[in-house]
Amino acid sequence: MSAQINQLKSIALGGVLALSMAPAINAQTLHQRTFSQRPLKTQKFSCGRHLKTFVVRSLNQQRGRGIRCVKVSTVRRGSRRLPKIAWYGEGNWNGKSYRHVGHAFGNRRIMRGYASDIYGNGEHFKNNFPGNLRVRMISPNRIQVTGAWNEEWIQVRTTQYQPLRRARTCGKFFDQYRVADLISPPKGRQGRGLRCVLKVGPQGTYAPKRYFTTWFGNGQWGQSTYSHLGTRSLKGAGASDICGSVFGPVCNHFNYGSLKIKPVGNGFDVVGAWRETWR
């Protein structure tokens, strides 16, 4: 009798242990299955807090998507040689990638736009637009570009977009400069960078090695990568970082006039808020 009772206790205890272990085993198996089949994350993109983020749609039924990172001038009145807006753009039309930098001049309602494609990094398009863009700011959140282009930009906070890989070269429509710290090693910062300076603009806007308006830059200082869009106003040159994703985590803003860009030999020295040589 005693032996039967002990046998029953052993069976009961084994059942309890099996039941207590079952949820843990099932949970572990479920966790592994969920992890292995987890869908890829959708890329959320914005240009950062210092630039306006726009998405692009075609007005002539082209298929594609893209973004525009727009810097709006704070000067309402002033020289017509200074841009009212400047932008960096990228995306694809009909499955073909593009990347460009542009700026527009005139009054904000109707502006004449200039833009050039950055290429040599795998982009498909290699075009230049020397003033044949009509840029209309329909509202602060909506811009139409017609003429050589036919598209509308709509401002958003974020959008689902996977950026192109970082640019390593500018292409023939830009003056291209390589960047280093103004102070030579070992005291200077370790890093490198690229500057793509627009050539196109109203007559008198651009003069090689002396004066320019809008540029795109990227690079690395130490372990931090960065990208930015720079341009000029009446107060002088300023720039804003394009933050996040492949553009880099650095997210700074440099007011107009805070950058002093001085012609030196075959390039420029940049002082003030920055400390760089462009050669």
Image (cartoon, helix red, strand yellow):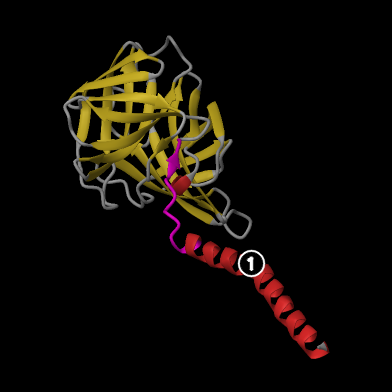
Q: What amino acid type should be assigned to the residue bearing mark 1?
A: Ala
**Which residue is outermost to the bottom?**
3
Quarter where residue 13 is shown: bottom right
Quarter where residue 104 is shown: top left
Q: Is residue 263 above or below residue 184?
A: above
Q: Is residue 49 above or below residue 243?
A: above
Which region shows up in magenta?
35-46
**Which residue is outermost to the front?**
1
Q: Is residue 85 visible?
A: yes
Q: Is residue 154 above or below residue 124?
A: above
Q: How many marks?
A: 1
Query: Magenta region, mostly helix, strand or loop?
Result: loop
Residue at (35, 35) in percent of width and height = 67
* Residue 20, horizontal then vertical, whole percent: 69, 68
* Residue 159, horizontal then vertical, whole percent: 41, 35
* Residue 236, horizontal then vertical, whole percent: 49, 24
Q: Residues within 10 Å of mark 1 (few under 14, many from 20)?
A: few
Disc 1 marks which residue? 24
| In the image, residue 194 lies in the stretch drawn in magenta | no
